[in-house]
Amino acid sequence: MANLNKTASPVMVYFAFAIVYIVWGSTYFFIQKALAGFPPFILGAFRFSIAGVLMLSWCKINGEDIFNLKTIKIAAVSGILMLGLGNGIVIWVEQFIPSGLVAIMVASAAIWFVILDKSHWKENLSNKYIVSGLVIGFLGVVLLFGGQIVQALDKPQSNLQIIGMVLLVFGPIAWAGGSLYSKYHPTTGSSVSVNTGWQMLMASLAFLPGGFLKSEFKLLDWRNISLDAWLSIVYLILFGSIVAFSAYVWLLKVRPATQVSTYAYVNPVVAVLLSLTFTNEVIGLTQIIGLVIILGSVLLINLPKYKSAG
């Protein structure tokens, strides 16, 4: 792993971070738009099955061995944890929980990376910059979406909303656990692209039982799905899954997990900026402070890297 850290091009690392930060930040917006036409379990199954098949087909065309049993086993575990559970919970709860509240709960993944990464406990927990950056970043996300939280909690909560909030506690844990499993179980016989393709394909299978239990496949009229929903799911497949998820899996291999986890704080910032650009939403002073705090926390978490580089 150390060799990968040394040989990874700094330009490629920054480019991969930019993709994960910006593209995944936009997926909150496009998931809600896609849910206007697709029920949640079909959305997950369709998105990840198409993305996985496209990725593996491309690898096969380029002469890669895509049927490596060890790769498939590792990808099944990490893919189902990250995409099936972690992302699947986000898709399901965005039907009835404000995106701001979802973003806050998902941002806790950055903290779970530190808690679950046992092999780096001494390094991470003894570093004042990393610990303070994680805490400050989470507080920044709370400030950013404070208004939405108050509005959501002031209203009577339905049983589905309560269940959704409970699930949102476990979703980031599953995502962080799957990410760390992928990081520490490298598939030396396969490329990142093959590994990513199988992760998405395996995750798509995790959505099928829910789709059948909720009769989504029986009730959905494909002819009535709006163009807007179709374009949103195409974006999620091509950019959210193939491009951004591939960049994320590669970053896990070449950078420390605490640095990669900063996506969880930056994504909500991007989501807010998109809302300001494409909707009538207005940003207040508290939200601006939250944005500044979040960006400052990312700098703190990465400060040890900058110091060592200097």
Image (cartoon, helix red, strand yellow):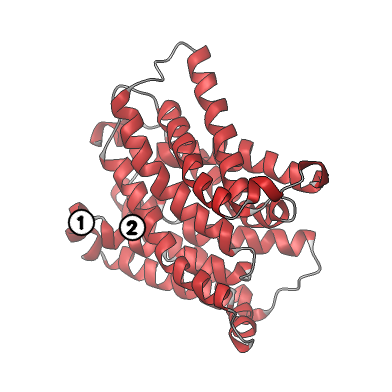
Give the x, y percent position of residue 225.
79, 46
Give the left or right position of residue 212, taking residue 284 as reference: left
- Sort mark 1 into few (<14), some (14-19) or many (20+) by Cα contacts within 10 Å: few
Give the left or right position of residue 117, taking residue 173 as reference: left
Q: Secondary structure at mark 1?
A: helix
From the viewer's side, name the closer residue of 119 and 286.
Answer: 119
Query: Cα distance, mark 1 to mark 2?
Result: 9 Å
The answer to which of marks 1 and 2 sits earlier in the sequence is 2
Give the x, y percent position of residue 26.
64, 52
Could you say which quadrant of the image residue 187 lies in? Answer: top left
Q: Amino acid at mark 1?
A: Lys
Q: Amino acid at mark 2?
A: Phe
Residue pointed to by mark 2 = 113
Residue located at (43% from left, 26% from top): 194
Residue located at (57% from left, 59% from top): 92
Q: Is residue 14 visible?
A: no
Q: Give yes or no for contact between labels 1 and 2 (Cβ–Cβ under 8 Å).
A: no
Residue located at (25% from left, 36% from top): 1
Q: Is residue 126 above or below residue 306?
A: below
Give the x, y percent position of residue 213.
55, 53
Q: Is residue 57 visible?
A: yes
Total marks placed: 2
Residue located at (25% from left, 55% from top): 117
Residue pointed to by mark 1 = 118
